[in-house]
Amino acid sequence: MTLENSPISIITLLVTVIISFIAFSQRSTLIERYSLSPYIFINQRKWYLLITSGFLHADFIHLLFNMLTFYFFAPILENTIGSLEFIIIYFGSMILSSVTSIIKYKDDPYYRSLGASGGVSGIIFAFILYYPEFNIYLYFAIGIPAPLFAFLYLLYCHFAAKYSKDNINHEAHFWGAAVGVALAVILNPAVITRFIEKVFH
């Protein structure tokens, strides 16, 4: 992972970490003002919340998990597809993964969502499209073939969004992953053939 090969990945990671730590020390102001509130988004037209919320995290563990995952997948993907396409996939997934939450909570003035999870999910799934032969490791120990991991991840997000009470926006994870795949295919349709050939070789 170098600035020359993956500049956007490095810059995004560093900026996210810095802003998140600043927000930790000024919690009542930055997080309240710049996390995604569907109610404020709709009624006050603060479109920038779709982006600013992706640079904020609820706590250190939330930040660590997202940025560690980002670190393992983003630089390789950017080096593979180029910085412009990487930007489109990451920020496109981050923005569009929030659509269902906005629709669902548009009348709730107390609902807040924050974190890079939608964008990170998009990066993981775009990565899987390009590298289905890789194993995805859970807790650095359990290796799962990438296509199987993708299926299990979406299945988990679907049921967690319906039944979990853990205050995690599982819908954003699901739709971030779906948008990541869709954008990767739109930007490079040939990746589908490549994916199929690698999975069924």
Image (spheres, rainbow, N blue to C red):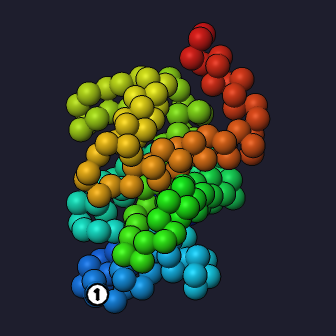
Asked where in the image residue 199 lies, by quadrant, the reply is top right
Query: In this figure, which residue is indicated by the disc labeled 1?
Result: 28
- What residue is drawn where x is 58% and y is 51%? 78
Q: Amino acid at mark 1?
A: Ser
Q: Position of residue 15 (x, y in %)?
A: 44, 73
Asked where in the image residue 46 lies, by quadrant, the reply is bottom right
Q: Position of residue 178 (x, y in %)?
A: 57, 42
- What residue is drawn where x is 65% and y is 17%? 197
* Between 134 and 138, the one nearer to me in the picture: 138
- What residue is drawn where x is 69% and y is 32%? 191
In this rendering, is residue 89 above or below 178? Answer: below
In this rendering, is residue 58 above or below 70? Answer: below
In this rendering, is residue 53 above or below 87? Answer: below
> In the displayed structure, does residue 45 sit left or right of residue 61?
right
Q: Is residue 13 visible?
A: no
Q: Position of residue 116 (x, y in %)?
A: 44, 61
Q: Position of residue 175 (x, y in %)?
A: 53, 47
Q: Residues within 10 Å of mark 1 (few under 14, many from 20)?
A: few
